[in-house]
């Protein structure tokens, strides 16, 4: 059964393995999370589990949110996320169950989902690493332009998917098959080797890899 947990990216550091090799890792403070709700095919037309993460004071939660937590007799949570899973996997979870880093094992492959860092409005040279125009005599103010993209006659439009300037980053990104180097159950930490998306203190979703090598 695949494991899923919410956490926060805390930064990068390095550790040393048994052979003395330096291993760069990203530290994720994961959980403990609490199951707050279950979605069933009979009632909601799909199967999922809603998970809460990071306790906060009641004054920071609106009235509908407090009604949910009071009905479940749970402490208010900052983040609530639905995690799709099969009905068999959802059946194994009960409302109020706590999910900790112990659901993972050191050395396994994981997938990490987060919102990538936003870089604002960028051109094609920085956004897509395009070459740009020539820098010789006679080239004016178009060295970093995308070049000709339109069609005067047929089909008289710009094709969908054409690489153009626009918003760079700030998208939901999934990095697959990262190696979980070490687990610190006492401090709820996951040490991951690989490129974890997002900035410091950004919310991340860690799950068992679905496409392992």
Image (cartoon, rainbow, N blue to C red):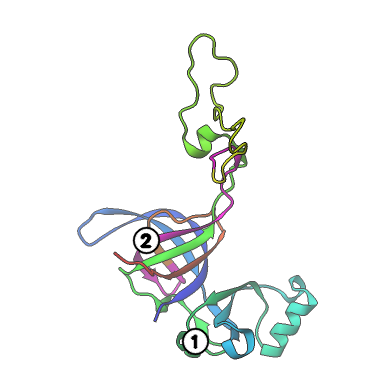
Q: Residue at x 22, y 56 (%)?
A: 20
The quadrant where residue 179 appears: bottom left
**Which one is in front, 190 or 86?**
86
Q: Pick out the residue farthest to the front.
A: 154
**Which one is in front, 107 or 177?**
177
Residue 87 disc label: 1
84 versus 144 height, above or below: below
Does the rendering let one see residue 94?
Answer: yes
* Residue linked to disc 2: 178
Q: Residues within 10 Å of mark 1 (few under 14, many from 20)?
A: some
Q: Residues within 10 Å of mark 2 (few under 14, many from 20)?
A: many
25 versus 167 height, above or below: below
Q: Give residue 125's position: percent from left, percent from top.
A: 51, 32
Q: Give residue 52's position: percent from left, percent from top.
A: 60, 76
Q: Give residue 103's position: percent from left, percent from top.
A: 41, 79
Label 2 or label 1, whichever comes before in sequence order: 1
Residue 173 disc label: none
* Badge 2 element: strand
How far apart, in angstroms, are the residues tagged by discs 2 and 1? 27 Å
Q: Which residues are magenta?
A: 162-189
Residue 153 counted in the magenta span: no
Does the rendering let one see residue 40?
Answer: no
Query: In this rendering, would 209 be left or right of 22?
Result: right
Q: Give residue 174's position: percent from left, percent from top.
A: 47, 60
The quadrant where residue 105 appears: bottom left
Q: Residue at x 61, y 32 (%)?
A: 153
Query: In this rendering, would 113 be left or right of 153?
Result: left
72 versus 56 height, above or below: below
The quadrant where residue 16 appears: bottom left
């Amino acid at each position: 059964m695949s494991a899923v947990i919410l956490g926060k990216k805390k930064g990068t550091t390095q550790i040393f393995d048994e052979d003395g090799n330096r291993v760069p890792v990203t530290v994720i403070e994961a959980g403990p999370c609490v199951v707050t709700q279950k979605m069933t095919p009979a009632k909601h037309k799909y199967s999922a589990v809603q998970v809460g993460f990071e306790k906060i004071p009641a004054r920071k939660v609106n009235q509908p949110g407090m009604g949910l937590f009071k009905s479940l007799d749970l402490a208010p949570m900052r983040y609530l996320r639905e995690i799709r899973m099969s009905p068999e996997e959802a059946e194994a979870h009960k409302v109020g169950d706590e999910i900790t880093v112990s659901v993972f094992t050191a050395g396994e492959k994981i997938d990490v989902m987060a919102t990538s860092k936003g870089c604002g409005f960028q051109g094609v040279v920085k956004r897509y690493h395009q070459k740009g125009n020539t820098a010789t005599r006679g080239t004016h103010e178009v060295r970093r332009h995308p070049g000709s993209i339109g069609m005067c006659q047929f089909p008289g439009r710009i094709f969908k998917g054409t690489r153009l300037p626009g918003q760079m980053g700030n998208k939901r990104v999934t990095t697959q098959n990262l190696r979980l180097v070490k687990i610190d159950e006492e401090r709820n930490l996951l040490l991951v080797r690989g490129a974890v998306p997002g900035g410091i203190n950004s919310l991340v979703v860690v799950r068992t890899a679905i496409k392992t090598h």
